[in-house]
């Protein structure tokens, strides 16, 4: 180089300060090589003017203008910066660099956002593209995956593609930068191996049956209201645990292995679906009026036992409970007590677990009072009445049946199964019979009081005797004859006390005079036997022992529960009651007769004693103690018309025989036990699989396909000249307090800042304009340490929420949830921006949703 030119170049460089030295030096050397040394200062000044107007050039690039449009703008400057060829070439070179950097910024910033946000669609597209480069459709698809990409970005991309058609070196540089950025981010963020391991560990724990109920409740609270199961929320759970929680330690370790701040969205969704499935609350189904089914993936009996008891109380016909647990059935309380007596129980699950040291399942039948009864039924209530029959004891209730169908049983040694029949109730004793009736007799004094009263038979008129009647306790039995021509009177009466009265008077006509005979007979009442003793009640039959079915779920073979205490006993029959004793027999009342005759000698006699009965014997002639029976003579026309009375001993009343005892063969219906219905095992197993067939696709299915990113080849010998800090796009990941927000910072702004600020201040924007504003806020650099500006942004966000609630038509046919999501995303991003400045946080705090 000419020494004079070199000196001039050095002089110009020396008077320039700072970062401009490189560009000025390059321009001057270029000018010198092209033979314009005499105009070194002028060229340097032109180049410096172009540098001064570089912002205008970059602004044109970021507005998506082509070179021709930008060149016109620069030519319009009064300085005439492009009048020299060197200056024009430098300006065009700056345009190439700006366009390259702007497009790379768009692409790399979008890749950064998609990777940090773990966008599954992007990772699927990048896996399907063998050679990502500036001309591939992948770049267009990538830019289209974010809302922040503008139409200007696509215009810049197409402009750069046109430029690269004639610049292979620049093409290689651009492609290398894209590939380097993809290698740097995709390798890290696309891998889902660690989170798949975490999901598998969670699924393993949820289905293990080794989780305490307290931990299960923690999972329920975690999934409450179907919240998104983010990585951050999982790590924040303060588990109830002890050192033996193998599954929990495995989950914690697997979560720590995840070196990202979030799950894939697809992973979160699958995990949410998995929790929805595994944590589904027990569903109570009454398939028939007699059968209750409880269905869930995992069931703790302590959570359902009260509901089952309530249903037993409400429905007396409910006799069988089937508990279906696809993963685990944890019996953490006893299934015993009055409500469970005689009920069928079916437990069907993959894992049956007993945590308690003694877990009792007792479906034994209800026992009655089986001891010898001391209760006697009522004795005969009246003379000669039999005692009441004894009541048969109730049958003991048969035990319910139990079916256990399980893949594996843990804690079998803690389980006690009771399937005993209930004891029968004792029959009651029969009541004793009442004593027999004692017939009433008569004495001579009493018969005188009863008999017709007269002085002389002969002198007393017939009318007197005919008109006489006994008192009202005696009723005529229908035999009553008075024949005045034949001169005889004959009447019979029945007393209320069972005695009988015969009143007879007849005239016996002789040759010279008529003799009048009278007899007044009282026949004593009949006695009766004592009442029979009541028959005994038969003891109730003991209930049947229950059937126990133990079946392996996987193959239907017998399931071994050798360590389990199993008790199956037949119930004892109740004792039979005793028959009641018969009552003592009564006695017959004695007979007594008063006879009289109209004669000179004494003719009034009493025949009969307190211990005798009288027989009335017909005879042909009158005697001292015979009397004419006018009824027999005149009505019956019998020639032996006289009767005599002879005493005979009163025969005792017969003794009642003892009651024959009833035996168990004569049990009545309530005393016979009823066997419980058997459990239809095949039907139960079939129902079990049908209950959970819809879960099969979810179990074990997690986000990510397991394909790992293979690094792209980058040409190492491509060295980029004068690479500056501004040309390198670096990832800025800013962690806010809760590690949820990622911020991607850009060196260039695409929207005019002043226009955005004006719209922030405009309180008349409709919902569509507000949506556009929230998008543009992130396209410019805003002074978020300006309190007034932040307050106005908050006000616009509040207005947007109010407009949503007021229900106007949504912009661009968006749905209400979509608009609300955009507002929430805006708040999150603003919080991220504020987080970049400690002073902004101190002034304004965070935006609230």
Image (cartoon, grey):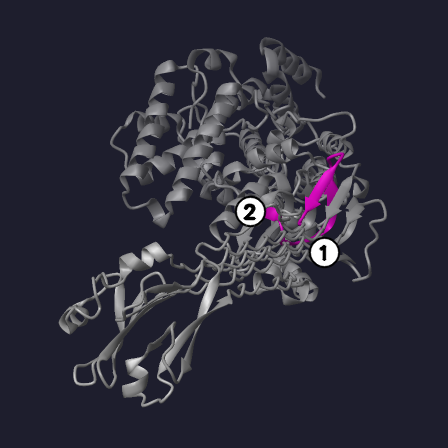
Q: Looking at the picture, how far across and down is residue 821, in whole percent?
A: 44, 38
- Residue 82 belongs to magenta span: no
Q: Looking at the picture, how far across and down is residue 120, in whole percent?
A: 62, 46
Which residue is at a point 53% across and 19% down the rendered structure image? Answer: 836
Q: What span is in magenta?
A: 339-363
Residue at the disc numbered 2: 308
The front one of 292 and 808 is 292
Residue 792 appears in view: yes
Marks 2/1 in contact by CB < 8 Å: the verdict is no
In the figure, residue 604 lies in which quadrant?
bottom left
In the figure, residue 609 lies in which quadrant?
bottom left
Q: Residues within 10 Å of mark 2 (few under 14, many from 20)?
A: some
Q: Looking at the picture, how far across and down is residue 777, in whole percent?
A: 42, 30
Q: With respect to residue 689, does 117 lie above or below?
A: above
Label 2 or label 1, whichever lies nearer to me, is: 1
Q: Main secondary structure of the magenta part?
A: strand
Q: Residues within 10 Å of mark 1 (few under 14, many from 20)?
A: many
Left or right position of 499 against 452: right
Residue at the disc numbered 1: 545
Q: Secondary structure at mark 2?
A: helix
């Amino acid at each position: 180089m000419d020494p004079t030119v070199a000196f001039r170049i050095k002089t110009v460089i020396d008077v320039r300060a700072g970062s401009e030295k490189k560009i000025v030096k390059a321009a001057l050397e270029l000018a010198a090589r092209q033979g314009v040394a005499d105009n070194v200062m002028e060229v340097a000044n032109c180049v410096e003017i172009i540098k001064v107007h570089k912002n205008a050039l970059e602004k044109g690039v970021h507005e998506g203008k082509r070179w021709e449009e930008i060149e016109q703008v620069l030519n319009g400057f009064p300085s005439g910066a492009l009048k020299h060829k060197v200056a024009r070439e430098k300006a065009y070179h700056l345009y190439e660099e700006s366009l390259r950097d702007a497009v790379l910024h768009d692409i790399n910033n979008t890749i950064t956002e998609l990777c940090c946000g773990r966008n599954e669609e992007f990772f699927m597209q990048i896996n399907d593209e063998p050679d990502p480069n500036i001309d591939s459709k992948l770049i267009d698809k990538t830019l289209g995956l974010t809302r922040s990409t503008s139409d200007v970005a696509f215009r810049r991309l197409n402009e750069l593609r046109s430029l690269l058609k004639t610049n292979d070196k620049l093409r290689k540089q651009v492609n290398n930068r894209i590939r380097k950025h993809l290698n740097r981010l995709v390798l890290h963020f696309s891998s889902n191996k660690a989170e798949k391991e975490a999901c598998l560990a969670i699924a393993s724990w949820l289905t293990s049956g080794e989780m305490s109920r307290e931990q299960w409740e923690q999972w329920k609270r975690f999934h409450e209201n179907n919240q998104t199961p983010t990585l951050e929320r999982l790590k924040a759970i303060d588990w109830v645990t002890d050192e033996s929680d193998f599954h929990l330690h495995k989950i914690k370790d697997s979560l720590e292995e995840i070196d990202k701040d979030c799950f894939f969205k697809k992973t979160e969704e699958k995990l949410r679906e998995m929790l929805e499935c595994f944590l589904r609350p027990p569903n109570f189904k009454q398939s028939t009026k007699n059968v209750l089914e409880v269905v869930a993936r995992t069931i703790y009996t302590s959570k359902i036992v009260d509901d089952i008891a309530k249903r037993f109380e409400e429905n007396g016909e409910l006799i069988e409970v089937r508990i279906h647990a696809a993963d685990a059935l944890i019996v953490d309380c006893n299934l015993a007590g009055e409500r469970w007596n005689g009920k069928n129980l079916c437990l069907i699950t993959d894992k049956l677990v007993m945590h308690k040291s003694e877990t009792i399942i007792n479906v034994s039948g209800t026992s009655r009072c089986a001891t010898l009864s001391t209760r006697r039924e009522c004795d005969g209530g009246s003379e000669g009445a039999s005692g009441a029959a004894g009541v048969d004891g109730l049958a003991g209730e048969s035990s319910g049946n139990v079916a256990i169908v399980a893949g594996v049983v843990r804690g079998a040694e803690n389980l006690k199964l009771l399937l005993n029949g209930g004891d029968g109730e004792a029959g009651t004793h029969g009541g004793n019979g009442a004593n027999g009736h004692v017939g009433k007799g008569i004495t001579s004094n009493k018969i005188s009081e009863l008999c017709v009263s007269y002085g002389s038979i002969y002198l007393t008129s017939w009318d007197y005797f005919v008109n006489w009647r006994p008192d009202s306790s005696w009723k005529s039995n229908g035999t009553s004859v008075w024949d005045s021509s034949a001169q005889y009177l004959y009447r019979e009466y029945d007393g209320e006390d069972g005695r009988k009265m015969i009143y007879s008077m007849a005239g016996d006509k002789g040759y010279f005079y008529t003799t009048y005979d009278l007899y007044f007979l009282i026949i004593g009442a009949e006695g009766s036997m004592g009442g029979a003793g009541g028959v005994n009640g038969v003891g109730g039959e003991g209930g049947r022992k229950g059937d126990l079915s133990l079946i392996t779920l996987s193959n239907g073979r017998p399931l071994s529960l050798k360590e389990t205490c199993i008790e199956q006993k037949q119930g004892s029959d109740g004792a039979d009651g005793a028959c009641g004793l018969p009552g003592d027999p009564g006695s017959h009342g004695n007979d007594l007769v008063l006879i009289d005759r109209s004669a000179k000698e004494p003719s009034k006699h009493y025949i009969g004693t307190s211990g005798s009965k009288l027989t009335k014997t017909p005879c042909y002639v009158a005697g001292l103690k015979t009397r004419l029976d006018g009824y027999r003579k005149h009505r019956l026309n019998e020639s032996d018309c006289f009767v005599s009375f002879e005493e005979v001993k009163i025969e005792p009343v017969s003794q009642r025989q003892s009651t024959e005892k009833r035996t168990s063969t004569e049990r009545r219906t309530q005393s016979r036990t009823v066997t419980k219905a058997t459990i239809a095992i095949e039907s139960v197993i079939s129902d079990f699989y049908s209950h959970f067939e819809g879960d099969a696709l979810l179990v074990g299915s997690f986000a990510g396909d397991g394909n790992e990113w293979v690094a792209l080849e980058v040409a190492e010998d491509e060295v980029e000249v004068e690479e500056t800090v501004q040309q390198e796009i670096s990832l800025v990941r800013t962690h806010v307090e809760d590690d949820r927000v990622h911020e991607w910072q850009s060196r260039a702004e695409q929207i005019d800042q002043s226009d955005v600020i004006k719209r922030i201040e405009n309180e008349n924007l409709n919902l569509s304009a507000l949506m556009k504003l929230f998008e543009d806020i992130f396209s410019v650099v805003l002074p978020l340490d300006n309190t007034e500006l932040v307050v106005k942004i908050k006000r616009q966000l509040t207005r947007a929420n109010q407009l949503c609630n007021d229900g106007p038509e949504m912009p661009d046919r968006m749905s209400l949830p979509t608009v609300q999501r955009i507002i929430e995303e805006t708040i999150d991003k603003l919080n991220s921006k504020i987080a970049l400045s400690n002073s902004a946080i101190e002034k304004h705090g965070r935006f609230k949703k």
